[in-house]
Each structure stands twice: as structure tokens, then as C-alpha cells.
Amino acid sequence: MLKSADALAEAGYQVRAVATRHEPWATDADADVRSRRSWPVHVVDYRRDGGAATYWRTGVEHRAARVAVAAVGPGRAPLPIAARAFGRVHTSMVRAIAAAPADLIYGGTTGALAAIAEAARRTGTPYALDLEDFHSGETSGPEASLVDALAARIEEAVLTGAAFLTTSSEAIADAYRERYGLRPSVVHNTFPLPPQPPDFARADPGLLRVYWFSQTIGAGRGLEEAIAALGRAGVRAELTLRGRPHANYLEWLAELASTHAPGVTLRHLPPAPPDAMVDHARAHDVGLALDHGEPRNRALCLTNKVFTYLLAGLAIAGFDTPGQHDLGVDLGRAASFVPSGDRDALAAAFSRWASDPAALDCAKRTAWQAAVRRWHWEHGQERGTLYRLVEEMLS
């Protein structure tokens, strides 16, 4: 959505954004992003210490809606109740979106889908939805069945009314077509080409610098498999993890490394603003794209990680999921996508790159060439697809 707002503003459209603020750690990153943009942003703040009134009010509404939905079932719950059970700040989002006139309302993320559709109905405005994930299959944990059922209830109600739909991978588009008979247009989560190419020189050719980032660092993201594979490969490596760790997870991961991969040093870095992610990745050799398994969305998604790695000139080690398969074929020597969960195959990839500097250099340069050739935001099949959809809707 950030890139879409930038692109539409650059094309001459008048853009107004509506966003939420609920994670205290992200406040500085949000401020950094806003300082670089001229288009206005209305923020729905429901941090406990920053938007206390909204925090408590929406918390009560959300819990009450969840109780009501649990009593009758997501499929039978009235849509307004289901929407409030699914998105905590649904009511606030509707008001914020509808507060100013527009020719098109375009947005995404799970909790905003129903709010976009309701605000559009209230104002008589066409709307479009970005389905960045397969929302009815992206939840894990004890409430997964309820949340996924709520997502399906919302999707069923709002997708057919959209002027257009976008999503981030061919596999997710196919999953939506299978479930609802509607196939979104694919706009990958690529990023603008940086002004300068990567520096492929390595300060220490004997050290394999491996990188992974996300908003949160926790189990089930392939990090355990990466450490086990690095240990089996017997390589000297530095594994850098950027994000906010779940409680005690880093300590557990360090213990795992000391037992199974003594040649691996773990390094933790805090989250960074989105505009800086490519630059932060450049100091490494290999980027990890190891999401797989449950929930279903992990197998279908094509994350922003892989496109960040390409623009930074990193080789990619990942699992050959439905979401990543076609990209892996396209990248050729730039990536090694192995069967999901196969630690031995992953170890072989690490071993090859660690023992053959020429092969690693080739992989990194091929990654950058792929980014320039196809996998960047300015490409006609990325930003160009968004422009075409908006122009067709407004014509």
C-alpha cells in the first residue's frame, strides 16, 4: 500500500492515506516514512499509551463481537458483527476512510477489508482491495479456526463488489479463484531499483554472511532449519536476524546454534524503516526465504524478503513452495530453492556457496541482474499493472 500510494501520487493522482498505529516499536519507523512523503495520512491510533480512549473502546467492541460470533458461528453472524470481530478498529477505520471524498478507495490488510467496503457503500464510492495474503488461511494458534472463518466470511461478502482485486503471488491468486471464482491481478511486493548497484566485494571470503528479517522473530519461520543446515554444512557463518524477537526465542536459537552449528555466530538487529531495508541487506551474502508449512498462506506467499534480497544483490536460499517455485525457476543460479523442510539439501546449498567464492559471486550478480531485468517496482508488470487497473476503473 505504501508503494501504491507513492506510485499513484507520482502519476498525478491526489492521494490520501488512512493507516493504523498500534505497535509502539513502529512509531519511529512510521514517522520516518511520513517525513519522506507529501501526501496526507490520517492515523487511527490505538496504542495503549498513545491512543488510550480508542484502545479501550475498540477493545470492548472487539471482545463483545467475538463473543457474539462464537455464540452463533462466523457463517451466521451478521456482517457488521463479523466485521468488528475480525477488525478491532473497524468502526474507526470506516469513519476515517469516509471522512473525505474520493473517486476510488483502494486498500488492504486483514482488518481493513470490511472497513473499505463499508466506507465505500456509505459514500457511494467504488472500492478495490489488495489481498496481500490468503487471509482465510494465514492464522496460526488457538484461535486460528475462528479467525480464518471470520476472514472467509468477510472475503465472501466484499470481494465480489470490488472494482478490482490485486494480490502478491500467482499461488495466492489461484487460491482465491479456487475458493471464490475470482482471480486477482498479481502485483508482486517488489521495490524500486536503488540508484547504485551492490558492491559485490567481500571483506572476509571465509565467512558466509546470512540474513533474514521480519517484523517479528519467532518459531516456524525456517530459522531452526537454517541453523541445522549450516551446522550440517560445517561452514563458518554469521546469521543476522532483524526484527522484534518473541520472548526467549533468541536465547533458545543461540543454544540450538551452540549445540548443532558451532561455526555459526548469531547477530540480532532491531526493526528498520521500510525505505532502508535494501541498504541494510547489502552487507550480506545469502538471504533466507524459508517460510513453509502451516498456516496455508506460508506455502502460497511470495514475501517481500526475496525481492529485497534481489535488489541488494544477495543469493537466495529458500524452500520450493508453490508461492516461490516459479520465481526460483526464473532466478536460476541466483537462488537455491530446495524441497520444503529438507535440511540436507539446504546444507548442500550453503556448503557450495561457502566453498566456492566464484559460485557465490555468480549467484549474487545474477540476483542483481534479475532485479534489473524484471523484479523491481517500476517494471510494467508491477507498478504498470496498478496504473492500468486504476485507469480502467476511472475511465
Image (spheres, rainbow, N blue to C red):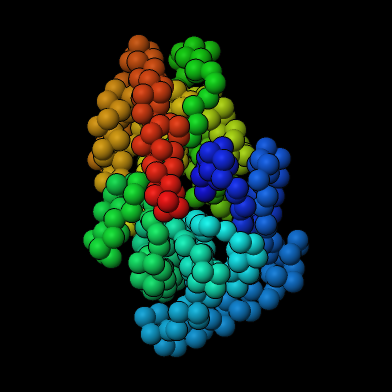
Residue found at the very far front of the displayed protein? 395
Q: Is residue 332 above or below residue 213?
A: above
Residue drawn at x 44%, y 42% as measured from the top left: 387
Residue drawn at x 36%, y 62% as measured from the top left: 137
Number of numbered discs overlaid on the protein picture: 0
For the question of whether residue 152 can be seen, the reply is no
| Residue 345 as seen in the image, left or right of residue 106 | left
Residue drawn at x 47%, y 14% as measured from the top left: 200
The x and y percentages for residue 251 are 56, 45
The quadrant holding residue 102 is: bottom right
| Residue 73 as seen in the image, left or right of residue 245 | left
Please state which of residues 161 and 240 is positioned toward the viewer in this rendering: 161
For the question of whether residue 84 can be seen, the reply is yes
The x and y percentages for residue 299 are 32, 50
Please state which of residues 374 and 279 is positioned toward the viewer in this rendering: 374
The x and y percentages for residue 64 are 57, 83
The x and y percentages for residue 17 are 61, 53
Residue found at the very far bottom of the displayed protein? 71
Please state which of residues 344 and 32 is positioned toward the viewer in this rendering: 32
Q: Is residue 324 above or below residue 68?
A: above
Please state which of residues 190 and 122 is positioned toward the viewer in this rendering: 122
| Residue 324 as seen in the image, left or right of residue 59 | left
Residue drawn at x 75%, y 61% as measured from the top left: 50
